[in-house]
Amino acid sequence: MTKHLTMTRSKYYFILILAVFLSACSTTKYVPEGDHLYLGGKVKVEDKTVKKKQRKALETDLSSLLRPKPNSSILGIRMKLLFYNMRSKSGKGLGSWISRKFGEKPVLFSQVKVDYNNDLIVNRLQNKGFFQSSATADSTMRKKKASMEYHARTGVQYVINSVSFSTDSSAIGKAVNATSKGSFLKSGDAYDLDAIKAERTRIDNILKEQGFYYFGPDYLIAKVDSTNNKEKVDIYITIKNETPEKARDVYSINNIYIFPNYRGGSGRDSVRLNNAVKHEDFYVIDRRKSFKPGLFSRAMFFHKGDIYNRTDHNMSLNRLVNLGTFKFVKNQFIDVDSGSVPMLDTYYYLSPYQKKSIRLELLGRTNSANFTGSEIDLSWRNRNTFKGAELLTVTAYTGTDVQFSGAGKGNNILRYGGEASLNFPKFVTPFKITSTSAYTPRTKITLGYDFLQRQASYTLNSFRTSFGYNWKESIKKEHQLNVLAVNFVKPSNTTEEYLAEIDNNPVLQHVIERQFTFGPMYNYTYTNTNEVNKPNTFYFNGNVDISFSPGIKTIMQATPSKFFRFEGDIRHYLKVGSNSQWATRLIAGYGAMYGGTKIMPYVKQFFIGGTNSLRGFRARSLGPGTYRDPRIGSDTVVADQSGDVKLEFNTEFRPKLFSIVRGAIFVDAGNIWQVNKDQTSADNQRSGITFSKDFMKELAVDAGIGLRFDITFLVLRTDLAFPLRKPWLPEGERWVLKDIEWTKAWRKDNLVFNLAIGYPF
């Protein structure tokens, strides 16, 4: 969807006046007599022995502890409080509804407990090693408003002198002592209670890998001795005397019981266990015989006689969850009396999804080509097709899309089709492959058909099939390998209007050529963006697509394409403060043809521009190179501009404004190019389309602003962008900053409004 901005100067004045009015509204309207509106508090660290950088960090940390929190504000305006003050005395009407729905009661100065906040400050400082700290407070009151300032005096920060692991010679004592080498507590570091807690958790994690199932971090104690009077502490890590015997024992796995049709109740009764079928070294209780026992041998990392460890515990659960067949997966360990060796019976309770289901979806969507439309999907699923958690999905769809601002306005789309896919939760190969990952590997077979009709242009029929594998090496790394991917595109019902335009624009012929691709495809993804506490996170996706001739010259009048296609997408996300983010993306793609193929198949080429790309340019209207189709923007049939080479760079600052709303300031740059010149007569060849050493001079650049509304289940995005550099202009005139003016004519030709679902990257 694209919309031109048509805001008059008077509207700007209206917004300015509205902002001034809101800021001038009384925020103390409902503050009782004798009380004050609480504006918040801050902590000032006044000890000069603390370095400036540490002092600022302490002030921020300590200020975050203060209670209560004042009313929230945006640019100094307490919007929720203003909404609250809109209520009427009767409690009825629009103002009262807004007050209840969006308002926030005033936070009063009488709610502030100064002594409580002083104690919080001192406690936190002592936890950071400032054992001689103190705090006082001052208040400032003016016109029914009040604020607090707390003054913290830290004293000298104590540091660690030594760390000792003082335990006995028992199995648990030796195990704890053996963990000392990787201790988080180092001599010379500042004393920090959080570091001591992390150290106890670290030790417990190591012990859980060694069979100490019932041990926990609370059974460890760190004794701190500061009697050396040199502002240093000695720390002694030891096991509490009251630690129970069970927590001191190493446990091994005894019997393993799996209930794949668990419906609640107790699974450990004798009647159920008598129906168990032994497979390898575990028991399956499945009277309906709904699942093949071999399914669980691929999911279980535990085996009878193994020493318990948390890694195998978690990996087994992850494998069962990732089968996609079970709605709930829970696990229980019960210690059993087996003589001198402590043992655990292991129980897995699996509640399956309904085996067969039908799902109907009505979708609204936008895409990078600035198409907006709807689609109806009807899918049927069988989650356990051959009793091995195989997923069979049959889907049929139909939809329509309207393009508001692409290369060819009004060239709307009708599409329908279907796909059948069969997904196996294992590697289906002629030889055995064992996966040691916590994630279930997949083998997928697909067969699909797509019908696409572009109004007043052409119809394309696409047939596709593939066979391949998908597996996650870890939570960060994922691989997808299609050993064979076949795609055949056949045009039909090409209109007279479209055929007539081919004489003037030979590129249009490439769109409706019969296309046949045959070959493998590999895709690799790495991401650590799930690590939300990291200041820097990355995402990388790279894929290789190869097509070759399967030993024949033509298939259904189509010549098999021969090419290599590479594309890489790398993204960096930087946390700025506590709520803002700076996101950057670089995309590079290249297609190399061989064996007589002169140009990439249209469905494999690169495109640029639109809602998820260069947002200041109409979708698929940019390039290739310095070429600009003169028909763009007219009612004439125009081909989407495509290329064999792509380079794109985007950077975007995303500050959190308030509640569910984030802002955006962004810059995009990039272009596409062809590897070879047009395969047409000299009169019809486009100039400037090929990739050369001057590619940097041919980049398009745009900039803009936007808003993102994160409403939990989706992110609604709006962007307003305009070009800064137009590569089709003569060299030396491509930067168009000097041409920016907010006239109606300039806005019509340059200002692009994008509405989309989700972040652009």
Image (tube, helix red, strand yellow):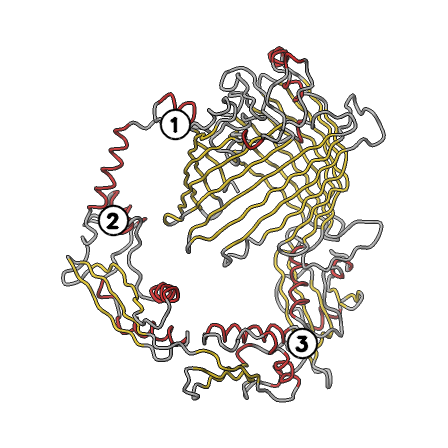
- Secondary structure at numbered mark 1: helix
Q: Position of residue 118 (x, y in %)?
A: 30, 73
- The reply to whether residue 706 is in sight is yes
> Residue at point 56% right, 51% down?
538
Q: Residues within 10 Å of mark 2 (few under 14, many from 20)?
A: many
User: Number of callouts in the render?
Assistant: 3
Precedes in sequence: disc 1 or disc 2: 2
Q: Is residue 70 above or below residue 737?
A: below
- Secondary structure at numbered mark 3: loop
Q: Position of residue 259 (x, y in %)?
A: 69, 63
Which residue in the protein does label 1 denote?
738
Name the amino acid, label 3: Gly
Name the amino acid, label 2: Leu
In this picture, residue 114 sits left or right of residue 194: left
Q: Position of residue 455 (x, y in %)?
A: 57, 19
Nearer to the camera, 398 or 510:
510
Precedes in sequence: disc 2 or disc 3: 2
Mark drawn on residue 211:
3
Name the amino acid, label 1: Lys
- The reply to whether residue 404 is in sight is no
Q: Residues within 10 Å of mark 1 (few under 14, many from 20)?
A: few
Mark 1 to mark 2: distance in Å? 42 Å
Q: Is residue 685 above or below residue 181?
A: above
Mark 1 to mark 3: distance in Å? 71 Å
Nearer to the camera, 711 or 501:
501
Q: Is residue 461 above or below residue 133?
A: above
Q: Position of residue 359 (x, y in %)?
A: 60, 41
**Image quadrant assignment for residue 626:** top right
Which residue in the protein does label 2 denote?
82
- Secondary structure at numbered mark 2: helix
